[in-house]
Amino acid sequence: MAIHKILFASLLICLLIQSSHAATKERLFSDLEKSALEDTATPSRVGEGVGVDKLSITWKVSSTATKEPEFKAIKVKLCYAPASQVDRPWRKTENELFKDKSCPHKISSWSYDPAMKAGQSFDYTLERDIPTGTYFVRAYAVDTKDHEVAFGQSTNEDKTTNIFSVQAISGRHKSLDIASVCFSVFSVVALLVFFVNEKRKAKIEQSK
């Protein structure tokens, strides 16, 4: 009897997992309400060199949005432009949302309140691990199940306008350079001390 209960419970859990997984698979990007959010992303350069350091981002709910009553949170992400997806399957755009890899970089998120409809503006400083490439910004509206229901982006549908470049940080910090020099000097000094001690030991042995 106990074995039957365990088998039944296991079967029920498997069915629930399969049902949940199937529901996740069914969520398609093409089913989302597009342009329900209006986004702008203005890049600026603060440090030296090329590329972007900071983004000034603004989003608001479009006057034509029909799914606003379902909005429970807004999630803003940094997405790869087509040029930075070529020959990179790990950045591939997929219609099935659980497979999509085009927007892996989370920028920020908020719980949605209708008072926020007029929009929010904020500055985002790019993380140091953002790869070199071309990007745009996309905002998703999600429901109570954390499922995307609508979106808007800072570029057009073909992702050809308002694209900006990011240059990954390849140089080293001054602190690392200083530490490297100090370590090198210490290594040389330690090596010299070792040779001096070895010579002294050799002389002592010869004098005996």
Image (cartoon, helix red, strand yellow):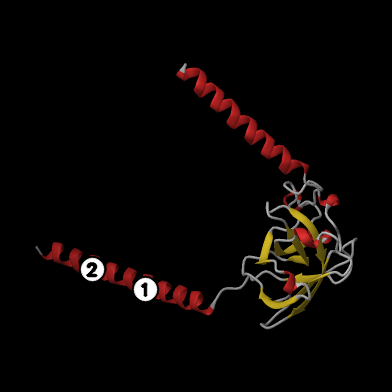
Q: Residue at x 80, y 48 (%)?
A: 94
**Mark 1 vs mark 2, CA separation in Å:** 16 Å
Badge 1 density bin: few <14, some 14–19, many ≥20, Cα 10 Å: few
Q: Position of residue 69 (x, y in %)?
A: 78, 61
Q: Is residue 154 left or right of residue 20?
A: right
Indicate whether 119 appears above or below 144.
below
Quadrant containing the C terminus is bottom left
- Location of residue 114 by image quarter: bottom right
Residue 154 is marked as: none
Mark 1, residue position: 186
So how many labels did they put on this image? 2
Q: Position of residue 165 (x, y in %)?
A: 77, 71
Mark 2, residue position: 197
Kind of residue at badge 1: Phe
Q: Position of residue 71 (x, y in %)?
A: 74, 61
Q: Position of residue 80 (x, y in %)?
A: 77, 61
Q: Residue at x 53, y 79 (%)?
A: 174
> Marks 1 and 2: which is nearer the front?
1
Q: Secondary structure at mark 2?
A: helix
